[in-house]
Amino acid sequence: MAQRKADSRSRARRVEYLFIDCVTPELDGARYPVKRLVGETVRVGADILKEGHDLVAARVVYRGPTDTEWSSAPMTYDHDADRWFGEFTATEIGRWSYSVEAWTDRFATWRSDLRKKIAAGQDVELELLEGAQFARTASRSTKYAPTRASLVMTAKLLEDHRDTGLGKRIQRALDDDLLSLIEEFYKPTDLTRYRHDLTLIVDRERAGFAAWYEMFPRSATTPTAAAPSPDDELESGADGAIAPPRHGTFADAAADLPRIAGMGFDVVYLPPIHPIGHTFRKGKNNALTAEPDDVGSPWAIGNEHGGHDAIEPALGTIDDFDRFVRAASGLGMEIALDYALQCSPDHPWVKEHPDWFHIRPDGSIKYAENPPKKYQDIYPINFWSPDRANLWNACRDVLLYWISHGVKIFRVDNPHTKAFAFWEWVIADVQRAHPDVIFFAEAFTRPKRMQTLAKLGFTMSYTYFTWKNADWELRQYLEELTQGPMAEYYRGNLFTNTPDILNEYLVKGGRPAFRIRLLLAATLLPLYGIYSGYELCENVPVREGSEEYLDSEKYQLRPRDYQAEGNIAADIALINEVRRTQPALRRYRNLTFHFSENPAVIFYRKASEEHDLLIAVTLNPHEPQETMVHVPIGDLGIADDEPYVVHDLLTGERYTWRGVRNYVRLDPAYQPGHVLLVERMTVPEPVRPPRRAL
């Protein structure tokens, strides 16, 4: 059979002298970027193979967002893993590129063989001449005269078998200085680069560590205007009707910021602050018919006062908003805005661009519905409109407008119902000019949709945490978030509740349940949040089995007395202070679960180079629980019989433990959990009695 000739396609293929594969981190064949925080180390791994016995060298090459040239860091071979590893530090926020290069390390191979032959007492004359060739070749790659001269002299020395002693030639051949010069100036002939340049998104610290607080400014009235409690005599007008609470303003919300900052929050998130539509406005408790004083749902955006770049007049003006943002900044907090791409029937876009919406056969615009539920007060946007270029630009310009007013964080409402291609485009476009902008995906949908949104660029995402209440559920889900492939691109934010989610666990567990879920959310991951009213343990649903709040703030004003008896503001402030002082609680992928003999008590470790934390939390809000927890003393470097102290950062108590099994008792009414700082003990030498003279 005739030998088949290589065709033009095979000749045109890129030649890969070495095999580079299984590079990590890499997401979906380099389709999407992975994520890190500024200052974090990026550890890159690869399988690198070559035929024969020649030694191989490899490096990570990387380029930051403002770099014009590539930098490199050496990779080393791990014999146990049979893989190569290298790392670099992400020093700047923005979009990075990185890859792996490898080549045959001919000089290292020659040097190794030379050592072996010398040790065996064999003749090495030819090897020294080969070494001279390395030096001469390297000399041609440097323009620096002293270095070139040094390499040329080395070549002559290695070639001089008459006047220079063998020992001196061998010494120079194996000199570390020569090794450094060859590594720098000898250009490999088979340099091979991985087939992809990979992408890394580096975000600022607040994208990975923050405590969020959600509030409605329209409910932030002063204490004197707070809604009366059911036991108080209600204020009545001349006709006997109950006077409604006053609509809050940005000035009222600014007055509440010191309280929020005092609890230790970093981000204050506001639901939509835009004008609210009149057509089909929702009434209290989602009633289809609104009363004259009903304020409507802020997610029904737009009326005669404007749309997504306007402010509800009852809240104030853009100048009032700017003052509110500055007030938060002065307290060390940032403002996050809701970015909800939907419109009320009264939104200016409906009149100006009806083609941006879904038009029905009768010419009407389709409103939102999830049969049997109807949302006539909201029109979804058609992101695949024939005029989508102008539509997409208008949606992006909304973001740019609020960025110009000091907002760098956006909580995006229901992104899974909008075009995925739009999110990939708009996030990249905005972050190209403003790499410090954070996008938070509010997508409670199927897992793969949530994961895809994170891959497309969302900085952080909501999670299923509110529905994970059993030991096995929490372990399984948090391990998926922090230890599996999702950890490369998906940053979970553990909100305890939202205006839409009042979990049954909180309804039936009362105040102890609120303290338990707070402790879990704040210590499992570095990102967590609460919705206002959580500190008051509000837990009355609109009906049995519903996750909707009674008298939901989504449809009415809800002023509160935050000093009311039974509030857990002190618990929140304490755990946020612990979070800020403990490096282990600022990290995402350092969570491991450990055995508790009672599954009603969950036990886990948050590790760091500085200090390790052991955390035990009861999952039963109704009665005390006892257990033996199994401490990973081997990972902590503690011997089997060595005593050690665990310092509870919540109570100040210290306990001396020994060995793996240790006792824990937790009472949800008083202490739902321990956050234990591991402290090593110095055990004094036993005092021995003096010897007696014989």
Image: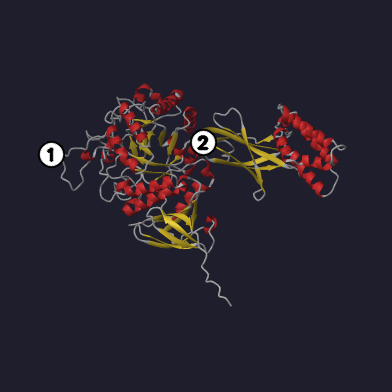
Q: In which quarter of the image is the N terminus?
A: top right
Q: Quadrant of residue 65?
A: top right
The percent coordinates of residue 244 (x first, y second) are: 20, 37
Q: Is residue 92 above or below residue 567?
A: above
Task: Indicate the secondary structure of the residue bearing disc 1.
Answer: loop
Q: Of the residues shown, which amino acid type is indicated by label 1?
A: Gly
**Which residue is nearer to you in this view: 454 or 666?**
666
Residue position for label 2: 202
Q: Nearer the viewer, residue 296 or 337?
A: 337
Report crowding for label 2: few under 14, some 14 to 19, many 20 or more residues within 10 A (C-alpha): many
Residue 19 x/y as whole percent: 69, 40
Compute the Cα span from label 1 to label 2.
60 Å
Q: What residue type is labelled 2?
A: Val
Residue 448 on image: x %, y %? 49, 42
Is label 2 in a helix, a strand or a loop?
strand
Compared across the picture, whether 281 is left or right of 212 comes to left
Note whether residue 282 is visible. Answer: no
At 61% from the left and 31% from the top, the residue drawn is 70
Residue at 52% across / 55% down in the picture? 636
Q: In the figure, residue 7 lies in which quadrant?
A: top right
Looking at the image, tell me whether mark 1 or mark 2 is earlier in sequence order: 2
Tell me the residue that label 1 is attached to.
240
Classed neighbour count for the residue bearing mark 1: other residues with Cα under 10 Å, few (<14), some (14–19), many (≥20): few
Provide residue 62's location: percent of width, then percent of height.
Answer: 60, 34
- Which circle, 1 or 2, is nearer the viewer? 2
Which residue lies most toward the bottom here?
694
Q: Locate the C terminus by quadrant.
A: bottom right
